């Protein structure tokens, strides 16, 4: 009986390794997939970002990575106290290797400008770091697979304010049961990985391009971000 279990675990370990290389196997069911991505990190933020980028780039058996041209890791200022999370790269981002450089990105830049922010004083990334084929929404399995990376990314940047754009980022980081139209424009104090941050969700710029009448709500949310920056006495550089 004992032997059988060992053989089974060895097999599971083998198949698990084939499928997924950023978690380790544990034979206790509750901890079966222990995340093992923080152990290599040091105190140097830039080194950690590089390590994380390499770690994501070495993901195996991932449809997103296999169909994308390159990783889209981040843009903006790694020392920023405001971090913005979108859904995933589109065609332009895939080509340039930077988040939010297409039409939605242009609108995001205008939204930031409206509250006197720019890419010099925010840091931007996405829930998934490779373009989903045909710009489809990442699947739940894909989101779960990239979530440890995103959590670690947030830990490294350690933002005081986290702005989630759209339902994919909201559902990945706050909860699946919430809808963006109800959750937007509300501050949530949240612990993500090892850090505590103030989270607010708003509409995704791509959605706002399709439904411009919703821009008034996004404007309310942006003003809340601006107010929070003052309340938290965040110094803006750039
Ligand atoms: N939409 C996103 O969610 N992220 C990008 O980087 C570009 C478009």
Image (cartoon, helix red, strand yellow):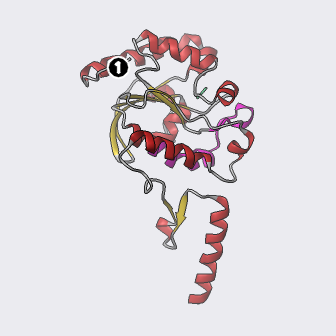
* Quadrant occupied by the C terminus: top left
Determine if residue 187 is in view. Answer: yes
Q: Point out residue 157 in the picture as x, y percentages from the top left corner.
A: 40, 37
Decide whether residue 135 is among the magenta residues. yes
Classify mark 1 as within 8 Å of ligand 1 or not, answering yes or no.
no
Decide whether residue 100 is among the magenta residues. no
In the rendered image, the vertical position of residue 64 relative to residue 200, given as above or below: below
Q: Of residues 227 and 180, which is closer to you in this image?
A: 227
* Quadrant occupied by the N terminus: bottom right
Q: What is the span of residues highlighted in magenta in the rendered image?
A: 130-152
User: As drawn, is 219 to the left or to the right of 228?
Assistant: right
Determine if residue 208 is in view. Answer: no
Q: Of residues 158 and 214, which is closer to you in this image?
A: 158
Q: Quadrant of ligand 1?
A: top right
Q: Point out residue 219 in the picture as x, y percentages from the top left corner.
A: 44, 13
User: Dot 1, crowdedness within 10 Å: few (<14), some or many (≥20)?
Assistant: few
Q: Point out residue 122 in the picture as x, y percentages from the top left corner.
A: 43, 24
In the rendered image, the vertical position of residue 14 relative to residue 219, given as above or below: below
* Residue at (35, 40) in percent of width and height: 190
In the rendered image, the vertical position of residue 219 relative to residue 85, given as above or below: above
In the rendered image, the vertical position of residue 37 relative to residue 237, given as above or below: below
**Mainly helix, strand or loop, the magenta region?**
helix
Displayed quadrant of residue 18: bottom right
* Residue at (54, 32) in percent of width and height: 167
Displayed quadrant of residue 223: top left
User: As drawn, is 63 to the left or to the right of 106?
Assistant: right
Q: How many marks?
A: 1
Q: Point out residue 76 in the picture as x, y percentages from the top left corner.
A: 47, 25
Q: Which residue is mark 1?
A: 237
Where disc 1 sits, the SS reads loop
Q: Of residues 44 and 28, which is closer to you in this image?
A: 44
């Amino acid at each position: 009986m004992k032997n059988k279990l060992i053989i089974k675990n060895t097999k599971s370990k083998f198949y698990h390794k084939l499928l997924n290389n950023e978690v380790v196997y544990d034979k206790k069911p509750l901890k079966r997939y222990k995340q093992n991505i923080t152990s290599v990190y040091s105190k140097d933020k830039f080194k950690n970002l590089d390590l994380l980028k390499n770690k994501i780039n070495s993901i195996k058996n991932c449809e997103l990575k296999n169909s994308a041209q390159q990783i889209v890791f981040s843009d903006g200022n790694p020392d920023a106290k405001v971090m913005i999370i979108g859904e995933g790269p589109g065609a332009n981002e895939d080509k340039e290797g930077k988040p939010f450089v297409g039409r939605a990105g242009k609108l995001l830049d205008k939204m930031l400008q409206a509250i006197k922010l720019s890419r010099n004083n925010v840091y931007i990334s996405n829930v998934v770091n490779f373009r989903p084929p045909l710009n489809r929404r990442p699947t739940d399995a894909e989101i779960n697979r990239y979530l440890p990376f995103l959590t670690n990314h947030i830990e490294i940047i350690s933002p005081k304010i986290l702005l989630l754009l759209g339902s994919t980022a909201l559902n990945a980081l706050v909860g699946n049961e919430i809808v963006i139209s109800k959750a937007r424009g509300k501050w949530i104090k949240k612990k993500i990985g090892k850090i505590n941050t103030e989270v607010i969700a708003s509409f995704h710029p791509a959605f706002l391009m399709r439904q411009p009448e919703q821009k008034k709500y996004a404007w309310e949310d942006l003003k809340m971000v601006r107010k929070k920056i003052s309340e938290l006495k965040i110094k803006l550089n750039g």
